[in-house]
Image (spheres, rainbow, N blue to C red):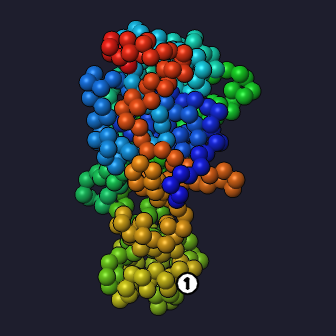
Amino acid sequence: MTDAPSPCTALSRFTVLDLTRVRSGPTCVRQLADWGANVIKIEMPEGLDQGDPMGGPRMGSDFQNLHRNKRALTLNLKQPEGVALLKRLVETADVIVENFRPDVKERLGIGYADLSAVNPRLIYASISGFGQDGPYAGRPGFDQIAQGMGGLMSITGEPGHGPMRVGIPIADLTAGIFASQGIMVALLEREVSGKGQWVQTSLLQAQAFMLDFQASRWLMQGQVAKQAGNDHPTSIPTGVFPTADGFVNIAASGNAIWARCAKALGLDALITDPRFSGGEERSENRHALNALIAEKTKAFASEELVESMNKAGVPCGPINTIDKVFADPQVQHLGIAQTLNGNRTATYVGQPFTLSRTNSAIVSHPPAIGEHTDAILADLGMDAAEIARLREAQVV
């Protein structure tokens, strides 16, 4: 990328007030910031808050990747004057995003009812652990808790080895992405109604939704999915197979692809073998089939096997460590890693989708705490003396 990439203007007409911390909320706001929204990150003044406990140090890679493309304002919402200033910002804002525990915003006087009264067009987005009401509303939320309660850990890992979490905070991440989607729907609806509304999601909702076909197996067929390890739960043979120098994934679901896979490995006789002739039979005899396939695959180098299987029309790919992911020529072609220069150089994880005419852009490194406080308050009509008084009173 160039030293000064052009800002995206797709969402530049929208102002977003960011009250979020840790991961789910910042993930939501990042989706808006990268597409050009005017994001103001609001934090407590230094010395009054412990910062983002799960986001790591401010200059650490995790925090930095979550908070690019924002301006920063400090505001003490525990003081009435701080709440009053927030309400002044709300008057002209389009969106506010928060992921406090549900009771916190009401205690501060900045809940949906409070702020929508100031600006009826406001889109107010809330992300919580379990929902804004209900029997678990007061519980603190955490990604791994949601992974467990939402069923994911019961179907992850090897059978007989106990539940297993996945290697990313998937409940946090998906809750943030769903919240951003809800915000966009609400903004589109506002163009018709002229009214704002309250967007709500939670880690538990997001995780239950992400069960997808495993959820529908229960809801429609009464089947409780179990751990299947690296095997696909229903499409066999699909899983991890050994090679001469490591492992690869092979996905040979359906009779046609299974036949191609068998021929490519010299296992033609298995195509008509009664144990493997149909999907149900292959599923019932998966361990025997996997062993026969493994005997063949371990004679190949991983790269050779990936090449030959794909040439035969069988989905097959390497199992990359993260460094190899970003060294992969297709990943590099897609441009997911984006380097921003300027006053320093850092490489961020870019957006995972593209538009034919509009590009997202990472145009600014995350701000220092309160970096733009003076400029934002000046936009509200405050002079230097008034800003100095607010600083002295620890309002900003």
Give the number of callouts.
1
Secondary element under disc 1, as helix, strand or loop, is helix
The structure residue drawn at horizontal position 41% and vertical position 48%, both measured from the top left corner, is: 343
Left or right relative to 264: residue 58: left
Q: Is residue 137 above or below residue 290?
A: above
* Residue 63 position in % (x across, y down): 36, 43
Q: Residue furthest right?
A: 192
The foreground one among 392 and 261 is 392
* Residue 124 position in % (x across, y down): 54, 24
Taking the image as drawn, is residue 82 in sight? no
Left or right relative to 47: residue 326: right
Q: Is residue 92 above or below residue 159?
A: above
In the picture, which quadrant includes the C terminus?
A: top left
The foreground one among 355 and 45 is 45
The structure residue drawn at horizontal position 28% and vertical position 22%, both measured from the top left corner, is: 48
Mark 1 neighbour density, 10 Å: few (under 14) some (14–19) many (20 or more) = few
Q: Quadrant of residue 285?
A: bottom left
- Name the residue beneath numbered marker 1: 311
Q: Is residue 160 above or below residue 373?
A: below
The structure residue drawn at horizontal position 26% and vertical position 29%, both measured from the top left corner, is: 50
* Residue 16 position in % (x across, y down): 54, 30
Q: Residue furthest top?
A: 80
The structure residue drawn at horizontal position 49% and vertical position 30%, both measured from the top left corner, is: 40
* Residue 389 position in % (x across, y down): 37, 11
The foreground one among 27 and 311 is 27
